[in-house]
Each structure stands twice: as C-alpha cells, then as structure tokens.
C-alpha cells in the first residue's frame, strides 16, 4: 500500500522516489485528512474537468470563464501551446483578449500534425469571427517557432494582423547571464528607443 | 475544481502553488488514468495503513515486516524520530536489528513530552525483552540531542548498552564545506586511527 502510493506519486512531473516518499510519510504521519481531501479533489477533477468548446482550455463548463466573459476583447486571439500558458499570461494581467490552446506543438515525427494540434478548429474560428489580430505565443523553442510559422502561413489567407510575442532579455535579467541565442534575438529584435 | 485540486496538492511538503499547478495540468492534460490511480492509492493508504504494534513504524499489518522478520537481530534496538529514518537506514544496509519509532522529538513547549513521544511504550519494551543495546539515532539537532539524552537517562536503569550514531564529516564531504558545528563534532569525536 505504501509502495503503491509511492509509485502513484511518481507519475507527477519532477517527482522521483525520494520526493514521493516524503509525500507519503507526510500524509500518513501528519495529514490523513489532507490525503483524503486530495484523493477526492483528484477524482472530482479527473472525472469532471473538460476542455472548453471554444478555446480548448481546461474548463468545468462548456465554455471556460475567459470565453464566456463578455467584457474581454474578442477581436484579439492569443495562441498558446498549453493551458498552463494561459495561466501564466493571465497572471501578468497584460492581456485582455481571448485565447486558443493548441495541443502542444507541430511534431510530424511524433505524428502530431495540423489536425492533431487543433489547427482545423482554429481555421474555422478565424473564418467566422470578428477576430482582427492573432498573437502567436507558442514557446521560443524550435518546435514553437515552426508551429508559429505554420499558423502565420495559414492565417495569411484571412484579413488578420499576425503578431508574435517579443523575445529578448528577461526583465531584471542581466546580459552577462543571458544565453547567446537570447542575446542574438534581443539584438535582431531591437526597437527604436524613445 | 481545478483550483481546489491545486489547493489540495499544496498540503504536500515543498509543494507551492506553481508546482501544484504543474501537477494539475499534467494530470488533466496527459494522465487522467494516473490521476485516478493516485486517488485510489491515496484512499487505500489513508484508510488502511496503521502503525506497527511493536515498533510504531507505518505498516499495513499488526506487525511490520521488520518486526515480524525472525532473522533480524532482536538484541539491538535502533531508536529513530520518524518512519522515514527507518527507510534511510534500511537503504544503507548497515543495520540488521530492530527499530523503535518515536513520534518526533521532545518539545515541552509544543506539549510533546515523554508520553506523547511513546517513551512509556519504549520503557515497557526495554523491561520485557532481550534487548542488550539501544542505538540512539535521533537527529543531530538540539531537539534530537535532548531526546537522545532523555532516553539514555531512562534506559540506564536497565542493564543495556546505550550507543549514539556517529556524527562528523559526511563520507565524500570536504572539510572546506562542512559547517563549524560538524567540524567541532568531528574533532571532539575523533577515534584512534589504526
């Protein structure tokens, strides 16, 4: 029982046998109520959390809170790789438009093409709606760049402004510690200073 | 649902909101089966794991595997603060005796005295049994030392050898990086070199 709980914890990202052990003993020795609550919250979420019909983010309802929020600007659509990215952008408070969540990034080798990514749904969305800007917020990895490029090609047929989030030195970051790719990107993407 | 699962994960030691978020999204997006398995393993363990009647370690049976193992030397009793400590010592493979688990350490300010710690049960155990050595393996903290001292005083009434695990520079550790208390301990506890 203890060992099977340990193994069950190991499926979590970044959790190895030692961390799992710490979790198991903590719950068993100090917080059995918390352990039961966690179990119930897990069952509840695993069974009832679906994907939003509009943006494909995780949601308990047909439409997620952001999609059903009429105050938000539906002329902007930010395209991200995962629901976690929405969370990150929302915490910055710098975006008031809507989202579209891909199922990761284009990876033909792994059998993940345009349809697996949900790009057909995205295309439908772009046809119908009042969107006049898409913001490509896929990750700054090779795969993320390829995916962004593919989407920008696809969206060019519509009369839509296509933008990509800026990449460069992080705020508070020091040039000295930035990697060469980031520095190269920061230089090539330099803006007029005013 | 997503938020309550996030909060439920935060009870785990070392897990904050960001890590919990990563767990939640990983399970919901990629491993719902794993999430359900974790929930079931949690319920199973929280409901069925008890404490061993003899050594007070966590166990699924009345007697834990170590206590019910007749091959192990029952003349030695290693006293530890938590069940996790047993796990650590067992992994070293250097000990073949039995264990006794305290409920932490003596801490009169928090209302944890001798009886809360299970020292009465320990005393009973020392009276009855064939134990001829107790090994004090409480942590090398102030509280652990006080607890060790208290137990050694208590055990002195019986005809038992009382030992304390050695403290000093960790194997593979460098003097340069050891803290002053460890160095002081390593010097005062020096042994004849042969």
Image (cartoon, coloured by chain):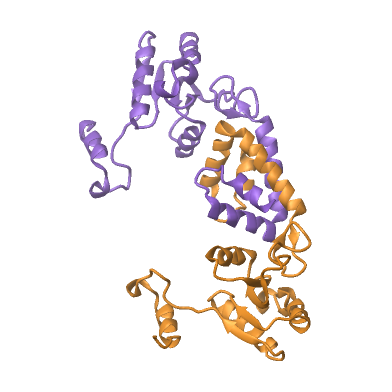
Chain colours: A purple, B orange
Q: Quadrant of residue B122?
A: bottom right
Reply above or below: B37 against A34.
above
Residue nearest the viewer, comparing A111 with A142: A111
Q: Residue at x 66, y 89 (%)?
A: B153
Residue B12 horizontal side relative to residue A144, left or right: right
Q: Nearer the viewer, residue A143 or A3?
A: A3
Image location (x, y in percent) of residue B152: 64, 86
Q: Position of residue B46 (x, y in %)?
A: 73, 52
Residue at (52, 46) in percent of width and height: B19
Residue located 42% across and 86% down the image: B190
Is residue B105 among what the camera can see? no
Q: Is residue B106 above or below residue A77?
A: below
Q: Position of residue B30 (x, y in %)?
A: 55, 32
Q: Quadrant of the C terminus of chain A?
A: top left
Spot occupied by residue A145 in the image (x, y as percentages of width and height): 34, 26
Number of residue marks: 0
- In this rendering, position of residue B90 left or right of residue B63: left
Q: Is residue B84 visible?
A: yes
| Residue at 37 percent of width and 8 percent of height | A157
Quadrant assignment, res B123:
bottom right
Q: Nearer the viewer, residue B79 or A23?
A: B79
**Residue B167 vertical position relative to residue A47 in the rendered view, above or below:** below
């Amino acid at each position: 029982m203890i060992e099977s709980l340990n193994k069950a914890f190991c499926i979590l990202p970044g959790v190895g046998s030692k961390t799992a052990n710490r979790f198991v003993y903590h719950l068993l020795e100090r917080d059995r109520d918390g352990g039961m609550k966690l179990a119930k919250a897990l069952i509840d979420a695993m069974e009832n959390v679906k994907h939003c019909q509009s943006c494909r983010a995780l949601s308990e309802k047909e439409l997620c809170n952001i999609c059903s929020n009429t105050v938000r600007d539906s002329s902007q659509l930010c395209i991200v790789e995962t629901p976690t990215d929405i969370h990150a952008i929302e915490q910055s408070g710098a975006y008031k438009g809507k989202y579209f969540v891909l199922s990761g990034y284009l990876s033909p080798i792994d059998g993940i093409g345009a349809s697996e990514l949900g790009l057909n749904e995205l295309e439908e969305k772009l046809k119908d709606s009042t969107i006049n800007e898409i913001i490509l917020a896929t990750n700054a990895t090779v795969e993320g760049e390829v995916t962004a490029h593919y989407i920008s090609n696809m969206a060019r047929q519509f009369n839509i402004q296509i933008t990509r989030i800026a990449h460069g030195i992080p705020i508070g970051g020091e040039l000295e510690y930035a990697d060469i790719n980031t520095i190269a990107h920061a230089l090539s993407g330099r803006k007029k200073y005013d």
